[in-house]
Amino acid sequence: MVIAGRDRLWKLAKKHGDARGPLAAWMREVEAASWRRMADVKARFPRASILSDNRVVFDIKGNRYRVLVQIAFSTQRVVVLRAGTHAEYDRWNL
């Protein structure tokens, strides 16, 4: 998968240094993936929350951080829509 919107991830990592390693690990896993459907995502990340419009919320660092993405399976692209702390996530309108 190709990840678009990395700047949102790096902004979070810059603000919260403890997120840097887990975010980098998540990016490596996503880049190595070749998901064809949402079931593939859930097989690898069982705690991910599946939303409408091919959107997924991933828990990072034991649910301390959240990453909201939209997946385009046909083009093998993951677009990072938002990244933030769990408290910030609680205020997102999903």
Image (cartoon, grey):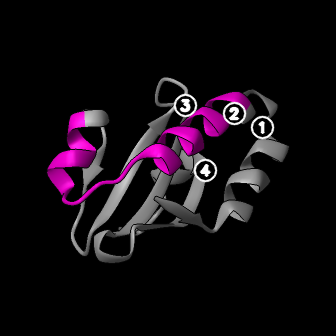
Q: Nearer the viewer, residue 19 or 30?
A: 30
Q: Which residue is mark 3?
A: 64
Q: Nearer the viewer, residue 89 or 37?
A: 37
Where are the magenta residues, as a range? 21-43
In this picture, is 80 found above or below 42?
Answer: below
For badge 1, the amino acid type reads His
Three-letter residue code for mark 2: Ala
Question: Which tag is nearer the camera, tag 3 or tag 2?
Answer: 2
Q: Are marks 3 and 1 in contact (CB under 8 Å)?
A: no
Q: CA distance from mark 3 to mark 1?
A: 11 Å
- Looking at the rendered structure, the secondary structure element under dot 3 is loop
Q: Residue beneath label 1, please?
A: 16
Q: How would you rate the neighbour count of disc 4 (Cα within 10 Å): few for under 14, some for 14-19, many for 20 or more?
A: many
Q: CA distance from mark 4 to mark 1?
A: 9 Å
Q: Nearer the viewer, mark 4 or mark 2?
A: 2
Percent x, y of residue 56 = 33, 57
Task: Choose between 45 and 28: the one closer to the eye.
Answer: 28
> From the viewer's perspective, is residue 52 above or below residue 21?
below
Residue occupying the point 59% across, 55% down: 83
Q: Tell me whether the residue at label 3 lies in contact with that at label 4, contact meaning CB atoms closer than 8 angstroms.
A: no
- The residue under label 4 is 84
Label 3 and label 4: CA atoms lie apart by 9 Å
